[in-house]
Amino acid sequence: MAFWFLFILLLGLATYLMVQRSVAHITRTPVWLLWLVLMTPAFLLSGWTLIYGAKQSPPPGLILWSIFVCTVLYWVLFQWGRQVPRDTQTEAQTQASESQPTIQPTPEPTVRPIEPTEETQLRNCFPWSVYYVQNIEYRPQSVICRGQLRTKASNAYQQIKTNIEAQFGDRFLLIFQEGFNGKPFFVLVPNTQAAKQTDTPRRNQEQLTRPGLALMLLAATLITTTLVGVQNAGVTLPPIWQIGSLFKLLSNPDVLFKGLPYALGLMTILGIHELGHYLTAKFYKIRSTLPYFIPVPFFLGTFGAFIQMRSPIPNRKALFDISIAGPIAGFVATLPLLIWGLAHSDVVSLTEKTQLLNPDALNPKYSILLAILSKLALGSQLTAKSALDLHPVAVAGFLGLVVTALNLMPVGQLDGGHIVHAMFGQRTAIVIGQIARVLLLLLSLVREEFLVWAIILLFMPLIDEPALNDVTELDNKRDVWGLLAMALLIIIILPLPQAIANFLQI
């Protein structure tokens, strides 16, 4: 068993390095997402081994279909975020203009970095009483200005941003970061969205949202989660290649209704989570895609949902609000569904085979929060020797807790990583992320169900993309909310202490 998980660890590392070196420079799709899709068959096999043991082989269809679906999904995600090389794009535009000479394409704005001859103008944008520039570094696509901050960070960024815009127009985006030495510095990067016609952003926004694609993926995910819900309800489905038998079975409304509680519950939680991100991004006028679900005909019926933001985040306040909105919204949607589902679940005897991932005999003491909610919903029915045979809605609610905890992990590009970045800054967030990865890896030695999480986090980059003003700190109210989010993570993933178990009489 140990050798198998060591093999998965090495395979995951090799796969991540391969994806990072081969496609990271030609697609905007996050490397970790592409890596996760490629590694899903291996993770499914590992999960099967954890649940059923190494002696029971998984169904061949599970592995074959996971490989097929993940290959197609990888290609779709890669193409969706693919960046067209500039020379290829120019050649395509030239061919289009030759074939249709009456159409004049809108030229792309030419963006150039600041030249050394413009250094005097640049220095004039930094008043000595605000930020004293000591050194200017010229890079191929950026200019770094290092010096001493002499006023509040928020005031300095706003004043220098105004000066840059007055002197250079909309040629640049101004980024304010804190260096590893603790000193803040400014970075000017080309603004590739500048100098476009007024109707172009509207067309881009329409193409960005793609409501048709979002609805199609929503419908497909409803189908796949319903199929998984039907199987969780105890209905044996024929193999997918037996289309006639499968269609005949699913044409029975009674069969479909057995899968809908799980499907609707899980999709509600995931959808509200992503809507929290989306609506908060819209509040800050950040261009973002609609929530897109990822359907799969096995496992949970979905790999979740996601949005992508196509505008820079203005400051750490916006970064915090957008990041925490998703987990909080998803958790608020999870609570009533989970409590209702637990109240309608059956209490069964606790056995040695009771595991976290077994919805037919779930030990509620695996999680502090789950134990408290189970006691609240079931009262005296729950004892120290009780396990839970979860109602389908409770299964969806339990997965909602898992999704909330995973997203709140304070690592890299996860919501929790964004939250600690906004609270403590980039340098401290990297340290916290590394500590969180080590702690979860140690926890997985005691609780094997966390091993897959630990492997995923090990390959997730710790460095997060900075906000434009990445120096100005948060207010006390947001710091409190951030600490509460981390406390929520702890009570979800940690097992119930015996002292609290005695108090709850479970």
Image: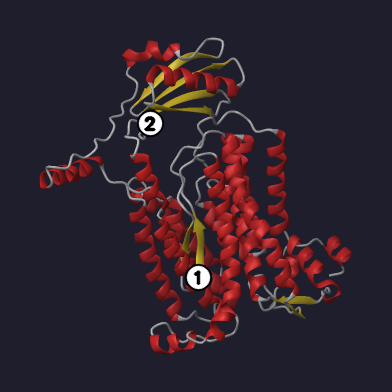
Quarter-of-image position of residue 65: bottom left
Q: Amino acid at mark 2?
A: Asn
Which residue is tagged 2? 191
| Foreground of the two, 7 or 48 | 48
Looking at the rendered image, the quarter that the C terminus falls into is bottom right
Q: Amino acid at mark 1?
A: Leu
Question: Nearer the N terminus, badge 1 or badge 2?
Answer: 2
Looking at the rendered image, the quarter that the N terminus falls into is bottom right
Left or right: 492 as drawn, with respect to 77: right
Judged from the image, the secondary structure of the residue bearing numbered disc 1 is: helix
In this rendering, the answer to whether 275 lies above or below 223 is: above
- Cα distance in 3D space between marks 1 and 2: 40 Å
- Neighbour class for label 1 at 10 Å: few (<14), some, many (≥20)? many
Q: Position of residue 71 (x, y in %)?
A: 37, 65
Q: In percent of the image, x 40 and y 46: which residue is there?
A: 205
Q: Position of residue 296 (x, y in %)?
A: 46, 69
Number of numbered discs overlaid on the protein picture = 2
Left or right: 314 as drawn, with respect to 447: left
| Foreground of the two, 181 or 122 | 122
Which residue is tagged 1? 222
Judged from the image, the secondary structure of the residue bearing numbered disc 2 is: loop
Q: Position of residue 119 (x, y in %)?
A: 37, 13
- Neighbour class for label 2 at 10 Å: few (<14), some, many (≥20)? some
Q: Position of residue 287 (x, y in %)?
A: 46, 43
- The answer to whether residue 242 shows anywhere in this view is no
In this rendering, the answer to whether 140 lies above or below 381 is: above
In this rendering, the answer to whether 323 lies above or below 66 is: above
Quarter-of-image position of residue 247: bottom left
